[in-house]
Amino acid sequence: MAIPIAARAAEFGTLDTPLLAIALGAGDALPPALAPVDAATLGAIGRALASRDFRGGRDEVLTLAGGAQGIRRVLLVGTGKPTRRTDALRRAATLAARNAARLGTGAIAFYAGPLTAAESEAVTVGLIAGGWRYDDVKTPPPADERRAALAAGTVLAPDLAAAERGVVTGTAIGEGQSLARTLGMMPGNLCTPDFLADTARDIAKRHGLPCTVLGRADMEKEGMGSFLAVAQGTPQDPKLIALEYRKGPKNGKPVVLVGKGLCFDSGGISIKPAASMEWMKYDMCGAAGVLGAMEAIARLGLAVNVVGLVGSTTNMVSATAVKPGDVVKSHLGKYIEIINTDAEGRLVLADVLSYARRYEPTAVIDAATLTGACVIALGHSATAVLGTDRQLVQEVLDAGDRSGERGWELPLWDDYKPLIKSEVADIKNVGGRAAGTITAALFLAEFAEAFPWVHLDIAGTAYSETDLVTIPSGPTGVPVGIFVEFVRGRAS
């Protein structure tokens, strides 16, 4: 699924590539190692730097012609003045690969000077992200109008051993993010709960993992009235999917990753406006993130125990759909008054979080495109992080910083609890417009009291309706990176 990436020594005199991307910071001079490349462009790189036609600003690019053989094009990519080199290299590599795909070069080599294993990993993740595409439901253009798809990438570095280590781990993460982005991009009539279950079974088969899938009848036996309330409006069979990765201590308690998997969300009886409703195919990005993370974790072979849980259905309008004012009994036994049927993700997650108790987890992290309020609060640059365990919250924030999928903590104070108090049941599923992200998390917290828990609201970060410079509009791969980095931090 992801483009293959290799590492090789930075030997420019013998390099044969259709495109060499070079990452340079603001004001950087031409490194001596690149003298053969400058010669291949007849001094064009040096002149571009001297005349300040290229200044190395963040996301700045300049394409130069090379020779008929060897290095045939050079792409200068600016990194600006970064505070974190890994983040800057990941971004530059993503942008470079996007440009390579646009040019139709078919392959790309990337150079940024000496690289540690972590920096090589970041470059690899970036190249894979920039080379990702979803063309499964597009008719190919006429042969004479086609450009070669990006099919391979190479990381060039003086320390080949470190670069190779980074390529291996970066490829694992890139594969997980590519899987998540593909699942997110698929139309809702193709990426169904059944398809997510089949994807989990495929991961399990390839990596030798136990996989359990519960359908409607199984969930009825479990007493999952909250989850099933959302699913009662659709003829599609809802799925609760459990993937288990057990490479840690034999009796060690697992980390549990939970993902919301609404393959399409119409809003139900509380129907959404028609404008942009097609974007609601992305309401399963939390589930895609869990499956992508499990793919990456299995490829990395981490010494840790992890369980991935996905709750998947569609929220549809029908004669059997749940109604505002209905009261349902959750898996935990608490009664929920449903005020708004478009606040359905928390109803699914409530029962999945309750189900997680059987694994006796050491920590539970859920991810969901849960609230529009989160987009208003934080925009598209930060994931909202809320939790019941101070140390776990900080651990998740640190994992987000390392992965480049940054989070920002919002309060989970008892002061907000009266907003979700019901007059007829134990709790209601919405608390009004004020503090919508917080009240949604407080609702989930009612079902996560048995373990340390953190909630990630990825409504603003899992997908974008506009081009983000480094990646096109559509799914971003969040929260695969933060999940994987957290689990890596827990590995023994």
Image: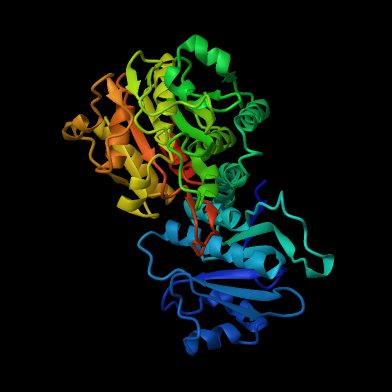
Residue drawn at the location 63% of the way across and 57% of the way down: 131
Q: Residue furthest right?
A: 143
Q: Is residue 4 above or below residue 467?
A: above
In-front residue for pair 309/264: 264
Residue drawn at the location 42% of the way across and 45% of the way down: 459
Q: Quadrant of the C terminus?
A: top left
Give the quadrant of residue 270. Answer: top left
Direction from residue 192 to residue 48 in the image, left or right: left
Does residue 308 appear in this view?
no
In-front residue for pair 100/33: 100
Direction from residue 4 to residue 238 in the image, left or right: left
Does residue 260 appear in this view?
yes
In-front residue for pair 243/384: 384
Residue 47 percent coordinates (x, y)? 54, 88
Q: Is residue 214 above or below residue 206?
A: above
Q: Is residue 357 above or below residue 316?
A: above
Q: Residue furthest top?
A: 221
Residue 84 percent coordinates (x, y)? 38, 59
Residue 161 percent coordinates (x, y)? 57, 51
Direction from residue 80 to residue 373 in the image, left or right: left
Give the quadrant of residue 155. Answer: bottom right
